[in-house]
Image: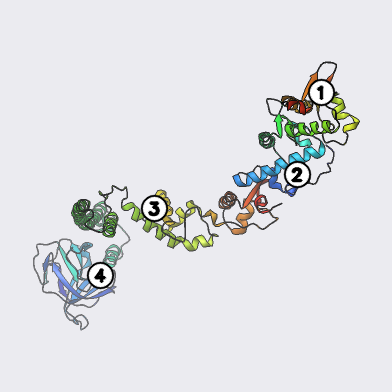
Amino acid sequence: MSEVDIEWPWQYSFPPFFTLQPNPETRSKQVTAWKSLILTYCQKTKTYLIDVREATQFALFNNSTINRKLEHNVIISILSELQKTGNATPIDKGKNRWEIYWHTLEEWSSLIYEYISNRGMQNTVVTLYELVQGEDSTNEEFNGMQQDVLIKVLRALERERKCEVILDDDIQGVKFFLTVSILCV
Amino acid sequence: MNRLKYTSPVLLDGESTVVVENNVRLYDGHQKTSFEGGELIITTHRTLWGRPGTIARGQTCLALHLDLVLFVEEESPSAFSFSRSRKVILHLSESVEESDGPQLTSYYSFIKLSFRDGYTSNVIGVLNDLLQKRLWEPPSPEAPLIPQMPTIKLRTGIVGIERSLQEKQKATDESITKAFQDLSKLMTMAQDMVRLTRTISTKIKEKQGDITEDETVRFKSYLLSLGINDPVTRDSYKSDNQYYKDLAREISDFLLSHVEEMGGMMALTDVFCRVNRARSLELLSPEDILNACRVMETLGLPLKLYQFNSGVMIEDNSSLSAEELSQKLGISVTLAKERLLTTEKYGKCCRDDSIEGLRFYPNLFLTKEE
């Protein structure tokens, strides 16, 4: 993986950071630091998917300057911590492939709905491609979002009855609703 | 006694004086004789006895030729004797010559020399030595020695060895009996004491409230130190407790300087070796030492078991491995590691476990705030 333009925290160059600490107090500080670093890193690099088996390719888990790597099982346990706050989900049984949500699905869905509302695009059908790859959304954070993650975000919106996801073979789109209509008398 | 002769104290050919002792009394067998307070001279050939000054003036004295002495032994002092007096028994062979001594016949085959003031030199050793050397015999290179050997060379013969073994056994037996006389008295006393304390404890139990709390506690502690179960509270304490406490004090006194030398810590195995080496006898079992060390803390002694939290300060921006720490402090690697782990346990350092080995860093996770 290429060099990443990210401001690494001091922990990143502190060798014990890459060893899971046995002291509970120390460990909780360490894990907290890792969690925030992972989210920052994924946000900066727009990484939606991490495969633990290829973790050494990420500069995140492999600091070549001090020659330290984070072990697989430690990565998994930290990602599991992220899962508790809704910031990550394993997508296979072996917990090797993880989707990372630096914004939780709920946060994403409100971001997207806000974007749609601001543009008055309710009651129109938007293709998923248009939504995350289109020219209009290039400045939005969700631009370039992976489709699997996007569908999960939209499904969350769907549960709130704010949209309807259309996943046909030929068209993959979404129709947003006006929230006002829900506030019926 | 009939083997002794009146003779002149002039030394014979090749004879020389070996030992001179004063205030010596002669016994015929077990019988005291009137020959007391005399001067005893042991020469290479004879044993001479004379009244004070007579020998020096060359007057007649009593002489026993060492040829007649079969073997020598010391009479063990009786249990009731407090004097410095020591007695040496000379076992004699049958006299072949007609006696011209103070006594013509004797029932006994031995005489005793009683040293009223003890003796200054090793009389037994000297006599044995002389009996072996047999300096009074003209040096004869050949045969005559051999037939004499079984009768006279007692120290090396089987009979001699057996006899000396017997004597030793007897002496040991006696000393053991003496030692245990006191002990059996103590044991009978102890039984009475146990009975006494039991009755008193029952009384305390009955009269609870009549005596103050303070007194009860104090009395209980007396009972405990006697090694008696307290039937009032049925505590499981025994005299072991007191034993461990005393032991803890002793170990602490002895080890403090050593532990300081070692850098403040010593593994329990080292403690065990050092304490037992210092005691050399009366060795302690590992369990006793462990138990004693356990109570150290409660006694407020300067040492305690697992005193690891005294803490290692690691300078910032540096890391340490157990090996480096052990070299720095001059302690064993195991101890150094134990210290680091304890430091880690208290959150003062954190670990870096890599292929380069386990190293410890100051715990910036807790100390460095963002």
Q: Chain of mark 4?
A: B
Q: Say which residue label 4 marks.
A: B45
Q: Say which residue label 2 marks.
A: A67
Report whether mark 1 lies on the same chain as mark 4.
no
Q: Residues within 10 Å of mark 2 (few under 14, many from 20)?
A: few
The three-letter code of the residue at mark 2 reads: Asn
In contact (CB < 8 Å): disc 4 and disc 3? no
Q: Say which residue label 3 marks.
A: B284
Report whether mark 2 lies on the same chain as mark 3.
no
In the picture, the quarter occupied by the N terminus of chain B is bottom left
Q: Tell us which disc is closer to us: 4 or 2.
A: 2
What is the number of the mark on residue A175? 1
Q: Eyeballing the image, is A130 above or below A84?
A: above
In space, the residues marked 2 and 1 are separated at their CA atoms by 50 Å
In space, the residues marked 1 and 4 are separated at their CA atoms by 138 Å
In contact (CB < 8 Å): disc 2 and disc 3? no
The three-letter code of the residue at mark 3 reads: Leu
